[in-house]
Amino acid sequence: MTSEIERALSAENPLFAESVRAVITGNTSLLDTLLTATPALIPMRSVSDHHATLLHYLAANGVADVLQVSPSNAVEIAEVLFAHGAKADEICDAYGTKYATTMDLLVSSIHPASAGVQGALVRTLLAHGAKVDGITGDGSPMRTALLFGYPECVRVLSEHGAQSDNIVFAAATGRTDLLSKMLAHGLMPLERRCTYFPISSDPDVARQQALVFASMCDQIESIELLVKAGADIDAIPPGSHVTATPMHTAAYQGNVRAIKCLLSHGARTTILDPRYKSTAKGWAEHAGREEAVALLLE
């Protein structure tokens, strides 16, 4: 592994490479020493196509696979970087987007999620000035977190004031006050362009989309409102990265309350998703959600 890391960093400035290693291994003292001695390391960028700064590496996404590592003390690493002047919303060219921020990379990365530091890192970025609705105000962090299925990030963003001015965001964040108004007035407004999962102009499909993400985020009151408004509980609406029924998304997250709610409304458990050809129970088994599996066996 060490030799693979060395190869991945071989073209970099030696001090930058050493700093990257300190970031991904959680070596706060070494990182602080390096940045104190060489402040230019903070704005310095990788020579790779992604042109990441040190802060971007903390998202463990969009860089060489071997460098996608989230240390358990990732928040401490972030604080060291910010203490030396790192900018929370600096962009890089990860995935060829030319506008990827650390936040967008973070809320779509499995590594900080698996390490149990993703939500805390989102809070840390926000505390240091990251824009909760993204650098263009288009809701990019929220829609990215929903797209990749990270409800903890959705909750943290919502707690810090992320906008919920469309039916999907309102349902997923439990903003039932807004959701009720949208359901009563033709689902409008839909000002926010959701690039990754366009909200359908068909009210029936839009309700189905909202139900999928409400189930993913364990928002029981949203589920109840949407079912009452006529959302098809077994539908597989377009526009989601995790195209499946509400039951599939609830099962994958291990959302026991949502599963019970959906079952109480007659949701079927034998439907196969179009991508993996699996039932909701299969999704729960894959994610290691034992309590959800037990419910779906009944």
Image: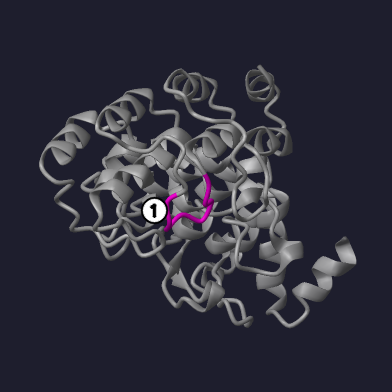
Horizontal and vertical percent position of residue 81: 52, 55
Residue kind at label 1, given as amino acid type: Arg
Towards the viewer: 74 or 179: 179
Residue 224, image quadrant: top left
Residue 49 position within the rendered picture, expressed as x and y whole percent measured from the top left:
60, 82
Drawn side of residue 28 relative to residue 88, left or right = right
Note whether 200 is above or below 62 in the view shown.
above
Q: Nearer the viewer, residue 271 or 86?
A: 271
Residue at (88% x, 60% y) in the render:
1
Q: Residue at x 55, y 43 (%)?
A: 118
Identify the residue shown where x is 57% and y is 34%: 253
Helix, strand, or loop for circle 1? helix
Q: Is residue 164 magenta?
A: no
> Label 1 neighbourhood size at 10 Å, few (<14), some (14-19), many (20+)?
many
Q: Is residue 92 above or below residue 211?
A: below
Pick the front one: 159 or 200: 200
The magenta segment is 237-244
